[in-house]
Image (tube, rainbow, N blue to C red):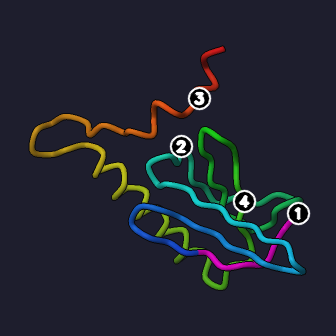
Amino acid sequence: MPRQGWMYLSVHYMCFYSYIFGRKTAIKIRWADVTELAKSNSLLFPDSIKIVTRDGEHYFTMFLKKNETFALMQQLANIAMKELIDDKSGTFNIDKDLLTKLSKNVQ
């Protein structure tokens, strides 16, 4: 069900918060967890931005400036990916949250 709310973009997270009619919705997504970021246009979610993670898909619609928001989201996701790779040593940083996450490929 679509909810009206506020989207907050930071260097490490994309957050969404909505509180309507006593119902609270809060979504917090790390940019490093994003596997797909795309503009989407379907009957159910017209003119939206789709964010896919290992945990699921999220659609966000009704932006005042969708193209600018999408470009900023792409930049932030790219920054997060670059931070995962340590340019000086050429190694990956350890993701401590990775051990607690389940993979959909393993049963």
What is the number of the mark on residue 35?
2
- Asked if the residue at tag 1 contacts the one at tag 4, i.e. Cβ–Cβ closer than 8 Å, the answer is no
Mark closer to the chain start, 2 or 3: 2
Q: Nearer the viewer, mark 2 or mark 1?
A: 1
Closer-to-camera residue (28/80): 28
Which residue was labeled with disc 4?
59
Q: Separation of disc 4 and disc 3 at Cα?
A: 22 Å
Magenta-colored span: 1-7
Residue at figure coordinates x 38%, y 39% from the top left? 96
Residue at figure coordinates x 52%, y 33% from the top left? 100
Q: Is residue 6 magenta?
A: yes
Q: Position of residue 25 (x, y in %)?
A: 75, 67
Q: Amino acid at mark 3?
A: Leu
Q: Secondary structure at mark 2?
A: strand
Mark closer to the chain start, 4 or 2: 2
Q: Amino acid at mark 1?
A: Met
Q: Position of residue 21 (x, y in %)?
A: 90, 80
- Asked if the residue at tag 3 contacts the one at tag 2, i.e. Cβ–Cβ closer than 8 Å, the answer is no
Mark closer to the chain start, 2 or 1: 1
Q: Amino acid at mark 2?
A: Thr
Q: Secondary structure at mark 4?
A: strand
Mark closer to the chain start, 3 or 1: 1
Residue at figure coordinates x 64%, y 69% from the top left? 16
Q: Amino acid at mark 4?
A: Tyr
Q: Position of residue 18 (x, y in %)?
A: 74, 75
Q: Quick one: which residue is furthest to the bottom in this view?
A: 64
Which residue was labeled with disc 3?
102
Quadrant housing residue 97: top left
Which residue was labeled with disc 1?
1
Q: Quick one: which residue is furthest to the top in this view?
A: 107
